[in-house]
Amino acid sequence: MSDLKVQESPSKTAVFAAVHRTLAHGAHGGPPFGPDRLASVFLPAPLRFLFRFAFLRNRVRRKIERLVPGLHAYMIARTAFFDRWFADALAAQVPQIVLLGAGYDTRAFRLARQNRCSRIFELDIAPTQQRKRACLKRAMIDLPDWLTLAPIDFERDSLSGVLAAAGWDGGQATAFLWEGVSYYLDPAAVDATLAFVRDHAGPGGALAFDFSVARSRAEAGDAYGSAAFFTVLERDHPGEAFRFSLDDEQAGEFLARRGFSHVRLMNPAEIEAAFLSREDGSSLGPVCGHFRFAEATPDQASPVR
């Protein structure tokens, strides 16, 4: 894969995810819909200033919802899904948690009080991690001793080599969180990542990830909000196109063939019901129709929960 171009700048979609989490926190003030009080740390300076004002945050949020129906709701649900999974891994005292493509994830900080013994490893491309360190330093937020940031190119580097160099212990159980990444990788890189997780999660380890059932507007068909999503992706993020997807009917079999059992898949309706329901029973709204959630356990392991 020597002809692949190495990404030389921080991920723009990681910043966009931080925008969604900042808007959600501003609108909802905390869990369950806006738990990320630290997301604004990673915004560019002009946005950090503008988002201090509620009327501007609301204007941006409404504009996003008009441009890409269901995307903001999906990002709220995605944050809640992985927050719950991460917290469950901490509660189960899984020795190691690996974030594959962490971006500007803040769970190691937000959920620190729940961490009794888990080592956490965040993997991402070097430019994104360098910017993350700079943002944390500017905000005077120190990395805890049990958190390690390790740079990686998922299509070039060896997961085992990168993790081993970072202090990860291949003999201990590991829970893997793979948020907002799989659809940007080529199929070979997805297969290599799944094979590594299968072989190294160990008893008590597991995998949680999200995936897409489409790579383009044409593949998405009439799924809610998807045509607008791919239009914006192609226009504003040409270097971060979708390259991998799974068919709904084949996703379970796909994971089973790669050595995973106890597979749980969530479609858009299930995602909305589980993570976007208000106390009065109403919903924040439907999510973009081409996204799915998945939890899976390697055959030799047992579920985290």
Image (cartoon, rainbow, N blue to C red):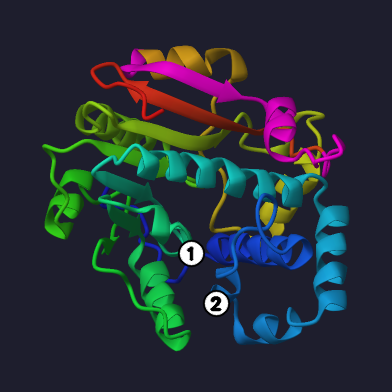
* Closest to the observer, 152 or 32: 32
Q: Which labelled disc corresponds to residue 122? A: none
Mark 1 or mark 2, which has the lower sequence index? Answer: 2
Q: Quote the CA–CA distance across marks 1 and 2.
A: 9 Å
- The residue identified by callout 2 is 41
Residue 74 drawn above or below residue 149: above
- Whether the magenta-drawn stretch holds residue 261 is answered as yes
Q: Position of residue 268 (x, y in %)?
A: 71, 30
- Can I make out residue 105 in this image? no
Image check: 70 left or right of 133?
A: right
Please tell me which residue lies in front, 175 or 182.
175
Residue lying at 59% horizontally and 49% vertically, measured from the top left:
79
Total numbered circles: 2
Read off the magenta span: 257-285
10 Å crowding of disc 2: few (<14), some (14-19), many (20+): many
Residue occupied by mark 1: 104
Of 203 and 65, which appears nearest the observer?
A: 203
Residue nearer the viewer, 217 or 167 = 167
| Identity, as a three-letter code, of the amino acid under mark 1 | Tyr
Q: Is residue 305 above or below residue 148?
A: above
Whether label 1 touches label 2, CB < 8 Å:
yes
State the image coordinates of residue 174 (x, y, percent, origin top left).
Answer: 26, 39
The secondary structure type at the circle numbered 1 is loop
